[in-house]
């Protein structure tokens, strides 16, 4: 019985890991197709208008990233004088699935 439970745990862990990897990979495609790469750099590739996202996943939570993508001005007010950049990134109208995939991809960049 213990062997069966161990085997089941391994299969479930592998399945969850594979789903996470696939989700992040589809987010990488969205990063390009939605035009994010035109303004943001990842590992030396992309634009320079927005911040470099190469290590963003180590800095921000998944929830923060999702909010930033869907409503950028909620974190950085346009014309802010507190030293943060002004929010020029447009809000997105992605589906929740696309938003989750894109945010998961950015969160994976550590």
Image: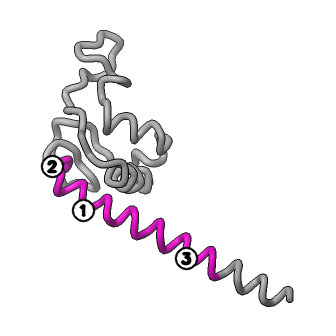
- Going by the picture, which residue comes out furthest to the top? 81
Give the magenta range.
Answer: 11-37
Locate the C terminus and report the quarter of the image it occupies: bottom left
Locate the N terminus and report the quarter of the image it occupies: bottom right
x 32%, y 46%: residue = 53
Against 59, residue 101 (above or below) is below
Q: Is residue 54 visible?
A: no
Q: Position of residue 18 (x, y in %)?
A: 48, 74
Q: Is residue 99 visible?
A: yes
- Going by the picture, which residue comes out furthest to the front? 95
Tell me whether circle 3 and circle 1 mark residues in contact (CB < 8 Å).
Answer: no
Instruction: Give the residue at mark 3.
Output: 15
Q: Position of residue 49 (x, y in %)?
A: 16, 36
CA distance for labels 1 and 2:
10 Å
x 30%, y 30%: residue = 72
Q: Quick check: is 18 in the magenta stretch?
A: yes
Dot 3 crowding, Cα within 10 Å, few <14, some 14–19, many 20+ = few
Query: What count of labels does the image hold?
Result: 3
CA distance for labels 3 and 1:
21 Å
Instruction: Give the residue at mark 2.
Output: 35
Instruction: Give the residue at mark 1.
Output: 29
Dot 2 crowding, Cα within 10 Å, few <14, some 14–19, many 20+ = few
Q: Quick check: is 43 in the magenta stretch?
A: no
Residue 61 or residue 11, whichever sits in front:
11
SS class, disc 1: helix
* Image colouring: one colour
**Residue 83 sits in quarter:** top left
x 39%, y 41%: residue = 66
Q: Position of residue 43 (x, y in %)?
A: 28, 56
SS class, disc 3: helix
């Amino acid at each position: 019985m213990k062997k069966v439970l161990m085997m089941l745990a391994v299969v479930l862990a592998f399945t969850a890991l594979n789903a996470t990897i696939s989700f992040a990979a589809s987010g990488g495609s969205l990063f390009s197709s939605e035009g994010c790469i035109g303004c943001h750099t990842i590992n030396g590739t992309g634009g320079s208008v927005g911040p470099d996202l190469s290590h963003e996943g180590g800095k921000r939570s998944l929830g923060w990233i999702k909010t930033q993508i869907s409503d950028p001005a909620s974190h950085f007010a346009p014309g802010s004088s507190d030293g943060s950049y002004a929010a020029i990134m447009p809000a997105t109208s992605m589906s929740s699935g696309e938003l989750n995939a894109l945010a998961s991809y950015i969160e994976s960049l550590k």
